[in-house]
Every structure is written in structure tokens, then in C-alpha cells.
Amino acid sequence: MHSLRSFAVVAGLVLLCASSAFADDGNALKAKHVAYTGWQFGSDAVSSLDITETITRDSDAKVLRTEHWKSIGALFRQDTAEKQSAENFSTGFTGNVFWRSDASGFTVPLIGKVDKYILASDLVFTDAVTALPWIVRGSSTVDGTACTIVHVEQQNSLPIDLCVDPASGAYKRVTIGPGTDYETTFDVLAYGEVTAGRRIITRYKYEGSTATHTVTAMSANDVTTGELHPPVQTAAWDFSNPKPFPIELSPHRIVVNATVNGVQGKFMLDTGASEIFFSREFAAKAHLKSAGSFEAHGIVSALDVQTARVDSLTVGGNTLHNVMVAYGGDVLDPAVPDGQLGFSLLAGADVTLDVSNQTMQIQPPGTLDLTKIPGVRVGVDLVSGQPSVPMKLDDTIDVDATIDSGNPQEVLISPDLATKYGLKMLVDPSLAGYFSSHRGMRGIGANYEVVECGHIDEMELGPIHYTYVGACKSPSFSGRAALVSLDFLRNFDTIYFAYPRATMVLVPPKS
């Protein structure tokens, strides 16, 4: 029922011993809250939830996103429809695997550090926090209401601070991960009855946000396990050519020739794109019929975006049928005038990118024996449809780095890495001119905005050391976010993409 619904198990919570002198006060406040909501997680009173939520912009009540969330205990499926992009996707938990599906039904497993945040969020919205000790930590005031702050911890999640109205027992403010990199606060604006006498949070707003989350429909105890399965895959590959085929590694792009509905085009291979995206001009040539319209907001621009279902997209003799794509906007790069091949191209296949020989190979998922490839095997977080990996800057600062082949820049970093985490960067004004003249496309044709450029000593990905790296700070990133792009990927002999297993293998050149 919210943008980061849990991908972690909330059943079988490990209870922590509360040694605080305020434990009794916490228990009394917890009892007050349970009396207010009328139920607890795991009870027969609310065995399942079916919730539709709308996120609207405060200034004009425009709908930005809708989310439909169904759960039975810890198992769930959430369907998200972004109104300001071409993205419709689903996430969920089967009891064994956390997953993400795109609009074509390509489903990949999810991994990554964000799970601790998501679990904490789920503990709050399912009210499973009432199965844990509450420790009183102080008091505060929210919208004129005095509330008591209680601290909650669970060993597999981020800590949680709840500001509880002692008069009613309702949450007034929730902070997930206080004091951590993932610290997030939202105010609870309203509760509503999901069934007679049983209340859940139905309206809330994140700190600093210009939008409000509102539950528009809800019911309890009517979800079946079949409704929690991933969406049926509607797109399908015809793997007709198991052999490598030529591509072009231009100075700034990986150029791939493809045929869409029989129309030839030139595209970039863009791991930073969470979908397949075509220019408006090429979409007209390929006779695409719009299935929907959205206003997509990039980093420095906005454009009207359409979605369409493509009958056939042929790459290297292999054909992807019935795949959902997006299109819109003008040609941004003459070297790849027709668009980007992103997540949907990689999500349902094993793809080999031979950088040294400039070839590509597309095979059925599971074909590659990753254990026998002599390279660096990396688990990738695909929660956004883009591969994100843990890296370290200058041997001290942990970052979450997106690997984006669609951008020619070397590295983009969050300004917070310098202001909050102590990154030292040698400023080089000459790089700013390079970056501004080679801005790349990411997602829906967005350009990056950079404010200061220079060099950092080193980035590390396991045993891989990427040294004396040109980098620019971008206000489009925050926290520990970073982006490495085509310059990074050029350093490898071969790159294996195995998205159905949430894995990449990077093979350095032979010495």
C-alpha cells in the first residue's frame, strides 16, 4: 500500500528483550494503540488485506501513481502504475522469493540492502510492530498534538521510531531508520476501518514531499493465494540464433541494430533504462499504436510519453514478441536515433556482451553456467529495473552504484557523498565541459544536470579497482547513490547479464 512495500518476512518475528526502565510505559502505550486499531498482525480478525492507494500532488490533486496491494500475512503482491512515466510494474513475495515484474511480465528475483528499509516499512503498515517491544524515548508535538516517541527494533530491519498519541493510541508520525542512511519520516493523517472496528492507516505524507498517499478502496479477509502470484508473462522470446552477432561500440554508446515490426532501426543498449524506449519519429515508422499516454518528467525536462505493445522486436536473429514499450520525444543522439533497449531486453534472457570483439549473444535464461565463467560474479539489485551494485569509494565510503551503459560519462555521484560522508574530490573544471557536452539519456530520455566535476581516487567492486575516476556531482542523486557507466564497462573483456538470476559476471581482459 505504499511505494516500498516489504520484500521480507514479517512472520515469526524475533522478539528483543526490553531492558529499559520505560518498558512498562511502552507496553501501556502499545495496549492503547492495539485497542485503537482493534486488531494485531497475525490475528484472524484481519487475515488478509486488499488495498488500493492513490498518490496525488498537493498543489492540484493530480494523480501521480496508483498502487494496488494484496497480502496474506507476509506474502504479498503490489501492482504499481506510474502516471508520470511509462512504467507499470509489480513486486511481491512468494514465501521463498522476492520478485519484480515489468509490464511485459518479465519477472526477476530481488536482492539488496534496501530490504531492511522495506521490512521496517512493512512492520508499520501491517502493524506487526505491536509484536515487538516498545521502548519510550521521549516526546514530541505533531500538528499541535503532543505524542510519545517509542523506539522499536527487529534484528532483520531498520529501527523504527513511532510518535504515538497517548490519548487515542494512534500513530502521529513514523520515522524509519532514525540515524541511518535510509532515515525516512512520514506523518499519519488519518485512519479508516478496513472492517468493522478494525483500523488501518489510510492517509499519510512523507516529510518534504509535495504529494499525499490516500487509500481509496480496502477490504479484509478475501484475498486468495493465487492472487499473489507474479503476473503472467505476456512477452515471449523466439531464440532462433544462439551465436554471437555484431554490435558497435562507438565512442559514447553501445549501438545495436534491431528490427521493430519489420522496420529497421539503430538503438543503444541501455542498462540504465527500466524499459524499451523509442523516439517519436521511429514509433511512427514502426506504426506503433498508443495503449496509453503519460507525462514523463526527466531530470531537466518533461515530455509526453505513449505506451504500445510491439508485435516483434528482432535483435541478432532472435525475436521478442508482444513486448510493451514506451515512446515519445525527439531524437537526442544521432548515433542512436531510434531509442534505447533496456530492462525488457535483458530480463528474460541470458545476454553476453563481448566488449573486445564487439559482439552480443542472446540465449534462453539458464543457458550460461555462471559458476564456470572466469570473472567477477556480482549480485545486482533490480528493484528499479536498473542494475545496482554495492561499491566503495576511496576504500572508505559505501555507495549504491547503478551500472548504466546508456551514459557516456564516467561517474555521477550524490553531492551528499562529499557533504555528509567525507568524500574528497579533486575539482577539475575541464571535466564539467566534457560532461555537459556529453549528457546522456537515462530512462525516459532525461538529461543529467551536473554542478561540479573532478576526480576521485578509486572505486571498488569486490576485487575490481577503478582508479583515478572522473566524476561529477549531480543534484539528481542523494544519499549514497552513484552511477557508473560506459567508461567503466569498457574496462572488461566480456560482460554477462543473467537478470533472471539477478546476476552479472564481469570478465577483465586477459593479461
Image (spheres, rainbow, N blue to C red):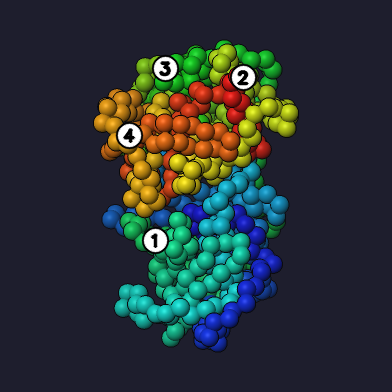
Q: Residues within 10 Å of mark 4 (few under 14, many from 20)?
A: some
Q: How far apart are marks 2 and 4 (CA)?
A: 30 Å
Residue drawn at x 54%, y 26% is: 310
Mark 2, residue position: 510
Up/down of 45 relative to 297, above or below:
below
* Chain-order first, disc 3 or disc 4: 3
- Residue 391 is situated, as x and y percent measured from the top left of the image, at 51, 41
Q: Can residue 314 be seen in this view?
A: no
Q: Is residue 295 left or right of residue 500?
A: left
- Residue 68 is situated, as x and y percent measured from the top left of the image, at 53, 54
Amino acid type at circle 3 is Pro
Up/down of 386 relative to 90, above or below:
above
Are circles 2 and 1 on residues that touch, CB within 8 Å? no
Nearer the observer: mark 2 or 1; the answer is 2
* Chain-order first, disc 2 or disc 4: 4
Nearer the observer: mark 3 or 1; the answer is 3
Q: How many labels sit on residues? A: 4
Q: Residue 7 falls in which quadrant of the image?
A: bottom right
Residue drawn at x 46%, y 52% is: 66
Q: Is residue 217 visible?
A: yes
Mark 4, residue position: 454
Mark 1, residue position: 206
- Residue 493 is situated, as x and y percent measured from the top left of the image, at 58, 21
Mark 3, residue position: 251
Q: Distance between the residues labelled 3 and 2?
A: 22 Å
Q: How far apart are marks 3 and 4 (CA)?
A: 21 Å
- Residue 339 is situated, as x and y percent measured from the top left of the image, at 44, 24
Determine the secondary structure under disc 2: loop
Amino acid type at circle 2 is Lys
